[in-house]
Image: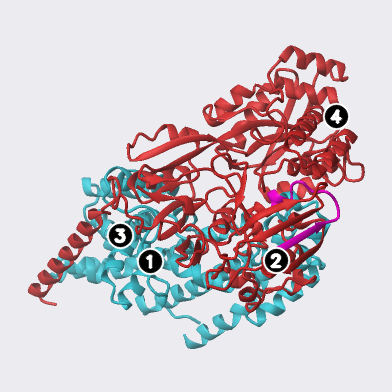
Amino acid sequence: MNRKTRYYLVAGLALAALAFIATACGGDDDNGGGGAGGGNNDKPLVIARDMDINSMDPSRAYCDTCQIYLTATYDTLIGLDPKDNKTFIPRVAEKWEGNADRTQYTFTLNKKANFADGTPLTSADVKWTFERLANVKGSAAYFMDGITAIETPDPQTVIVKLAASDSSFLAKVNASYAGIINSKLASANGATAAKDADTTDKAEAWFLKNSAGGGPYTLANYTEGAEIRLARNDKYWGDKPALKEVIIKQVKDAVTQRQQLETGDADIAMQIDPDTAKKISNKSVTIKEVPSFNFVYIALSPGAKDNKIDLNPKIREAVRSALDYDGIIQVTLGGGGKKQAAPIPNGFLGTKNLQLPSRDVAKAKQLLKDGGQPNGFTIDAMYPNVNVYGVDFNTMMQKIQSDLSEIGIKLNLQPVEFTVWVAKIRGDGIPLTAVYFAPDHTDPIQYVQYFGMVPGAPWAGRAGGANTPLLNQAEVDLSAKALASSSDAEREKLYESIGNEMIKDAIILPIVNPNLVLAYRSELEGMHYSACCNLEVARLKRK
Amino acid sequence: MARYVVVRVLMMPILLLGLVTVAFVVSRTVPADPLSTVVSERQLGNPVVVQAAEKRWGLDKPLPAQYVIYVRNLLRGDMGTSFRTKQNVRQDLEDRLPVTIELTLAAMAIAVTVGLLLGILAAVRRNSWVDHLARLFALLGSSLPVFWTGLFLLYIFYARLGWFPGPGRLDPRAVAPDKVTGLYTVDALLAGDLGTFWDALQHLALPSFVLGWAVMGIISRLVRASLLEVLNQDYVRTARAKGLTERSVILTHALRNALIPTLTIIGISFAILITGAVLTESIFAWPGIGSYAVDSSRALDFPAIMGVSILGGVIFLVTNLITDMTYVLVDPRIRLS
């Protein structure tokens, strides 16, 4: 290579490098600006979210992101009014009714309802969907527990018969996991609703690339760990969605979500915690804190194998009284949360008049004395090392450790991976732990069936020990009445009584009901938090 | 050398079987419950759901039976279905590996180019400000945690200055090019889509620099040390005495010998970068093997953990072999046997 050639080569490389830097430095048109296309619903909507997808198959899916995806792509029989998050509204079913004792429900389907491929949505699809949901035995299969028969006298009528009263059934069919599947399309791709579907159904892989619903959007692409891309269903039979394309992007942490939101790379950031939200001053971004139905709690298990302490009701009440709830909410969420009385979140039926917990150290010390532990004790506290709803569990548990040390209770903190925690809680149990909960549907019975001291409830078993669940007969009787009641007023009173019984149990001690931060570009309209579905993207549009 | 290579290649399946056995035993004996990945926590008390899940994922069989089934399926090319992604693990790896390869190749290109240049400059200008600056740069690259560097550079160059794009492989609203190699830069060029090529290249800049910086520091220090050692040897003095230019002495005579230890580091670094790009991938939202490995481990996703272990093993074995072969090319005195 002679000197002249070398000069040309060096000059060429330098120009290429400059061109690269210039291009890179050019950045996006949206960077730092307000984002292009106000009023342009053709511009794809980007949602930044740390996704927790466990399946794209409606009968097997069970996660927060799944709720958003399924709501967009599968229509449910009934919807939820976003104005109050309580009232059911028509969707595929234009009307419905339950019998007096809530053992039978009849749904009349809208004749216009169809799937994205144009196939009419009929009662046969509803029956097939519900049977598949039950028979694949996924995490949401329990929604269909107690169904004895599903009758389809004509294409527009579905009659569901139950073995026992279940006033929560409407809430269950409103949940996104009960979205109606195009049975012909899914069957042609390996799905089955037969009794042995748990072993014979082969459609889960197909659902990773395809949706088979009649919702306002269809699945355009799913790249695991990267994005879910939804395309508007232009054949949608109901109110047409405004946005042409919606992309849910995998973005792990709140800081990056915030940056993407502020630069306009994202239109919605879904996991901004209240602390991060306070640092956003960009006028193109709207921040709203709304109450959520999620909560974080600590739980006591007197029957845990490793427990050496007599965790009697007085000791449990002492723990409740020793906690500085306001301080914990301040430390973990910068004040962005609320106290919660019982393991039924604020806003659910029956929670309005429940008494919120408060700190009383003197009372706690007296209760310890009355409970036979005047000098306090040391107890193991294993918990999952997670950060959920903006609550860092390590920070929270350190504050709880500090609070309890004031009355002589020493916590031996053991943060572990979630899988390790699950192995322990399913095995020997954990004397004191911390966990979190988000609702599956809008009926409070789910909390009784999970946290109540009633037969079959996981925490009744954990509290009492594997073979001797701790039971509260009052909760058993009250929940049976609530399930059989068709009156909301009566159910309100019954759930209030159940809430008070759960407070008396003092097994589950709710710590905080965190606020949800809605962080989005100001040009968006229709942003809301849905109790059933997390976020209904079909209600969004650009100004 | 051909015989040596054949023996090494023939040894690979035996070494991999050993790796599979160790990974299987270790992953199955940790005190954790993989069911929490396939069944929600609140349904783990439901015997019907738990039984169905155990049967479906083969967890109802004793461990030796699970091992035999796994190895038998593996020999047929079936790596199983991931508990977490619900895809065949082989498919997962095929999707994820090109992402990490693209990132790692770019990181390695930056690390080698800048590292060599800095190393040579530091050796030639020993104890000058150039040498001190190169040392500081190397020190920062080796000592700053990747997560800090990544977040800091994103904050400065993306969020504040807007000079570089944010996380992801393309603009969030852009559509990926049709898959040929899985490397977006290459696939975009193959499709003749220069816009997407530039987009992909821009998104590659920050993460590849962050990932490559640590290796860059190691390479530059190693090149400097080796070069200084070689420059003191007799044959270099002879070359100078013969009247060769300093550039010719350094680049033609000294550097070639000084590169041998550097090649070892480059070979090992490549494997380390591929399997260790976890934090960079996580911070820059690159769905590669690193983040796949971490997510799978946290979820105790047995088939995925096994798949990543096998892939990591293959990468290490192959890069070691290539490194050994490269010695021969660089130094004809070395014979492999």
Q: Which-is-in-front pick, marks 2 and 4?
A: 4
4 and 1 marks on the same chain? no
| Chain coloured cyan | B
Say which residue appears at 20% left-offset and 68% top-offset.
Answer: B249
Mark 1 lies on a secondary structure that is loop
Mark 2 lies on a secondary structure that is helix
Q: Please give the chain letter of the residue carrying mark 3.
A: B
Identity, as a three-letter code, of the amino acid under mark 1: Val
> Is A57 positioned to the left or the right of A425 in the image?
left
| Chain coloured red | A
- The residue under label 4 is A309
Q: Which-is-in-front pick, marks 3 and 1?
A: 1
Q: Which-is-in-front pick, marks 1 and 2?
A: 1
Depth check: give the residue in front, B67 or B135: B67
Q: Is residue B261 visible?
A: no
**Dot 2 surroundings within 10 Å: few (below 14), some, or many (20 or more)?**
many
> Is B6 positioned to the left or the right of B41 in the image?
left
Q: Which mark is residue B202?
A: 3
- The residue under label 2 is B24
- The residue under label 1 is B175
Q: Kindly report the distance in space between the C-alpha atoms of the residues bearing marks 1 and 2.
A: 38 Å
**Dot 3 surroundings within 10 Å: few (below 14), some, or many (20 or more)?**
many
User: Residues in magenta?
Assistant: A157-172
Mark 4 lies on a secondary structure that is loop
Q: Please give the chain letter of the residue carrying mark 4.
A: A
Image-quadrant location for residue A492: top right
